[in-house]
Amino acid sequence: MTTALKIRLSPETDTGIFSSGVREDTAWAASEALQMDMESHHVFFNDEGFHNHITHSLLSIYALGGSPEDIRAAYERNQSYQRTVVPAVVEVIEKMNATGVFTEYLGEEKHYPNFLSFFQRQIDEKGVGAVLNEYVFAESEQAENMLCRLWGGLLHPLIHLGFGLEFNQPAIVAQALAQAAVHDNSLGRDFFLPAEKLAGGNGKPGNKSLGQLLEEIRNDETLSRSARNTDVNKIRDGVFHRAPQEMRKYAAQYTVSEDQVEERLAEMINNVGEFEFDLVSVGAVSESFADVLFVVYYTSAAQRPNKAVKMDFFFIHCVNSSIFFSKLAYLPYLNQRTRLRLLEWKGRMDLLMYVSRGCPRLLRDEITNYPVKNDWSTLFARAASHPADDGHLAKFVRAAAHGEKVCKPFESQGPQAMSVSSNMWLQIGNMAIDSTVGDEDGAMWIRSTGFDEAWVHVPGRARL
């Protein structure tokens, strides 16, 4: 039985948003390893705030149909460099539980174990839905603070929350909330909240897709050149330093209106398949899936024809977090305003990430001309058994396969057709696998594809 203290995966009930041939023996192996990770390791594996990815890795391998041997190999590989758990402070935990107020401890890494204990107890007493609504989505000052932090750390708290919700694991939800609590809130303070205010609130009518906005951004020289390769933090020191108002202006134009519900309701009812959710939430996300998953396109199309294919390390986090919106948008305990808000913030994050990496030129032919050597089942197996992956590759391949499934019903929408459609999803999966195999030396990904400097050490492309 799962609790906020006990992780237990069932191949009958905990198969996730997208899975392929989950195994009972793998469920047991993953549960055991995830429990050890929670009890033994810190959320960060070093003093620079680099994240422990064991949860993401193991759950992705499990969902892709990996074996117990794949689970154990991934755990051993990634546990070797983790920091050990930090002792909790009973007095701090008791104070949190007594008042429900913890603002004074936010943003401090040393309080991660205290937050973990607090949220574990809260979830066991109230349930996941009640805790999320009270401490993240209530729009109180403290909850807004937490919501802003959820998007920090290159989306890792959000991704961790997505995994916990997707696989029905309250303990992993508690980890995610504790992780969010010790992150910075500057992204929300400097970007999400001001952009929302500029948009006139959330849920306002909007007519522009992410694709349209990306094109406008590329043509805006002030914004498109705001980040520089020499910037230590390309969001903080680049975009927010040189073009904050421009970034917010474009971000504010990406909205998800409640009016779109009825407009798209009929087509969504015909396509929800196994999902049994209330009609309002289904309609709300119908027009948004294409935009949320558009990031798959700019991640894969940001190539240099004279260089070997590589995926941008920062872009893949936007891809890897997109899959969870198929869960977040349907949670029955979220109100409509929260659903729309989450979708809007995700789209705005995708825009910001594109700008921060130098607005790379997007070459669709790089995808459409890519040879398909492996089917999905082979790609899943190769990702699950990759000898150096810490979870990023497995997450990406699964997100791409999920994108194919979700977007397929919308491929015939005429002028609003998907940037990625048909066989392109499988081509992207092959690109991801081919570009990381043989790069077990740590160069599996490229960082900031819009800058020439990022490509200097990437080998030239082989020509026949």
Image (spheres, grey):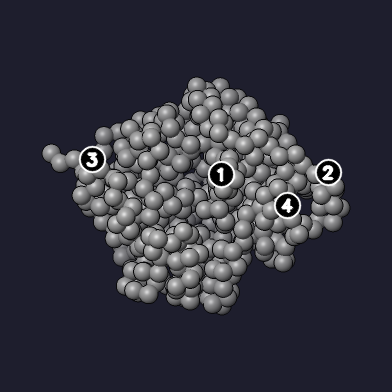
Q: Label 2 vs label 1: CA separation?
A: 25 Å
What residue does disc 4 label?
131
Q: Earlier in the sequence, mark 4 or mark 2?
A: 2
Where residue 26 appears, as percent x and y from the top left, is 54, 25
Q: Which mark is residue 90?
A: 2
Q: Label 1 vs label 3: CA separation?
A: 34 Å
- Disc 2 vs disc 1: Cβ atoms closer than 8 Å? no
Q: Label 3 vs label 2: CA separation?
A: 57 Å
What residue does disc 1 label?
51
Q: Quadrant of residue 335?
A: bottom right
What residue does disc 3 label?
371
Give the mark toward the camera: 4 or 2.
Answer: 2
Q: Earlier in the sequence, mark 3 or mark 2?
A: 2
Q: Label 4 vs label 2: CA separation?
A: 21 Å
Q: Is residue 11 visible?
A: no
Figure disc tally? 4
* Residue placed most toward the observer, 82 or 9: 82
- Which residue is drawn at the image coordinates 44% and 52% (left, top)? 314
* Residue placed most toward the observer, 30 or 287: 30
Q: Label 4 vs label 1: CA separation?
A: 24 Å
Locate residue 300 relative to residue 119 in the image: left or right: left
Quadrant of the drawing holding the C terminus? top left
Q: Earlier in the sequence, mark 4 or mark 1?
A: 1
Where residue 253 appears, as percent x and y from the top left, is 46, 73
- Which residue is drawn at the image coordinates 21% and 47% (left, top)? 369
| Element type at mark 2 | helix
| Vertical side of 250 occupied by 325: above or below | above
Locate residue 329 relative to residue 94 in the image: left or right: left
| Vertical side of 265 occupied by 56: above or below | above
Residue type pointed to by label 1: His
Locate residue 41 relative to residue 64 in the image: left or right: right
